[in-house]
Image (cartoon, rainbow, N blue to C red):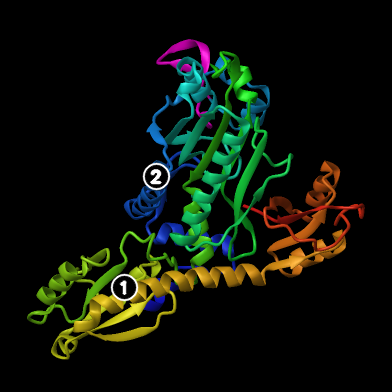
Amino acid sequence: MAKEFVKDVTSMDEDFAQWYTDVVTKADLIDYSSVRGSMIIRPYGYALWDNIKNELDHRIKETGHENVYMPLFIPESLLQKEKDHVEGFAPEVAWVTHGGSEPLAERLVVRPTSEVLFCEHYSNIIHSYRDLPKLYNQWANVVRWEKTTRPFLRTLEFLWQEGHTAHATDEDAMEETIKMLNVYAELCETILAIPVVKGQKTEKEKFAGAKATFTIESLMHDGKALQSGTSHHFGTGFAEAFGIQYTDKEGKLQYVHQTSWGFTTRIIGALIMVHGDDRGLVIPPKAAPTQVMIVPIAQHKEGVLDFAYDLKKSLGQVARVNIDASDKKPGWKFNEYEMKGIPVRLEVGPKDIENKQVVLVRRDTLEKVIVPLDQLDTKLVELLDDIQSNLYNKALMHREERTSIAENLVELKETLEAKPGFIKAMWCGELACEEKIKEDTGATSRCIPFEQEQVSDKCVCCGKDAKQMVYWAKAY
């Protein structure tokens, strides 16, 4: 039975895409819906999102932001107000043309993002420098009509938060943009155990309508990159299109400077692909809905279940603990909770009770530890901390091993084929070179990292003088 269960998951090295699909469905994260590219997030998947959402929401509020909610529908005329923005989203927009059986006088867009809605609102409520800054955040769903879809990574509808802020000066807006990028990076690294590279997107890759886009990029097990969160500095572009002005201290009319930043359910895809293995999910303890699963052994014997429930109650003070008291065999349970990536399995049976001990099995290494009952609370907390840091260090080591340097296009192409991952290479800043790299290798610029290195003097593509080092990679 146990072997059959694991056999259901395709090996990562054999077919990574199929492995991913197997894991998201068999670990009960999602189910497919009747609409192509839409997913049902099942309770276990939603509990995971809930944890991530709560951690982020706390950080957003801590930095002075308030949560609001904007409508789902955007009138076509409103979307048209910012030219670059509408052009950037046009291919992905879903339109509503009828209300009941009546054709609408004006088509409505199902929001792909909410910039224009916030802008319209801000133009109504911002009048004076005393109204600034406006620090709003929305938790919502959005719809983008993607051609190719994959659960969490790219779906027609996804969940996210989108922050939208308005400031008196360009400096204030830039400070906000970087601050929120750092919030995302800290969440990824400390809660999700995912190391990230922070940097700025190139002009080609920046958000439609933004003055500058900043990103955190992470590397998956298969060597592909994933954009894990973005923060945009809008300058006054949207404010000018929507007439968002305030009277400054001298009584002069000024345009506000805006930002926008977003973090989505695709981070669950990153979590799966950074930490997962051939047995299924591996979830870092700080993100895990259940940190410890108690599996009673020989639970039909007198006192075993009572003891297990007492343990659940006492351990509940130091961790998120659950128990499987179903009549399924222990071997099935072991496989089930390994598949679900639960950080620690606690086994307890009649002999353990007699010896005043339990067995702890850690998901990341599958190592078993026998722990005396009088040390259990302390040891469990230590073990969860150790798993958390081990997963981060393992992911960081993988990223370092899969980060290469290329000095010319031939090297870049050969390295990508031999060892997929991040490639550090110099760039002259020309769009033509960026496009040629993508055309020849399939790699895109992931970011111009804040931490710059001079890996050579010449552009990796054209050989002309270069001053910026860029991370390149194939990406999801």
Mark 1 vs 2, N-terminal side: 2
Q: CA distance from mark 1 to mark 2?
A: 26 Å
Residue shown at the point (65%, 32%) measured from the top left:
208
- Disc 1 residue type? Val
Residue shown at the point (67%, 38%) measured from the top left:
212
Residue 369 seen by the camera: yes
In this rendering, is residue 163 above or below 132?
below
Using residue 380 as the reference point, say whether residue 17 is left or right of it: right
Using residue 303 as the reference point, say whether residue 37 is left or right of it: right
Q: Position of residue 233 (x, y in %)?
A: 61, 36
Disc assigned to residue 62: 2
Category of crowding for the residue at label 1, using alpha-carbon neighbours closer than 10 angstroms: few (below 14), some (14–19), many (at least 20)? few
Using residue 332 as the reference point, say whether residue 364 is left or right of it: right
Category of crowding for the residue at label 2, using alpha-carbon neighbours closer than 10 angstroms: few (below 14), some (14–19), many (at least 20)? few
The magenta span reads: 95-114
Determine whether the residue tagged by mark 1 lies in a helix, strand or loop: helix
Q: Position of residue 100 (x, y in %)?
A: 40, 16
Outermost residue toward the top in this view: 105
Query: Within the magenta stretch, is there residue 99?
Result: yes
Residue 13 seen by the camera: no
The number of discs equals 2
Determine whether the residue tagged by mark 2 lies in a helix, strand or loop: helix
- Location of the N terminus (image quadrant): bottom left
Of 160 and 15, nearer the camera is: 160
Residue shown at the point (27%, 77%) measured from the top left:
378
Query: Within the magenta stretch, is there residue 112?
Result: yes
- Disc 2 residue type? Glu
Q: Position of residue 222 (x, y in %)?
A: 62, 65
Outermost residue toward the front in this view: 250
Instruction: Please name the residue that numbered disc 1 is placed on.
Output: 381
Magenta segment main secondary structure: strand
Name which quarter of the figure residue 14 lies in.
Answer: bottom right
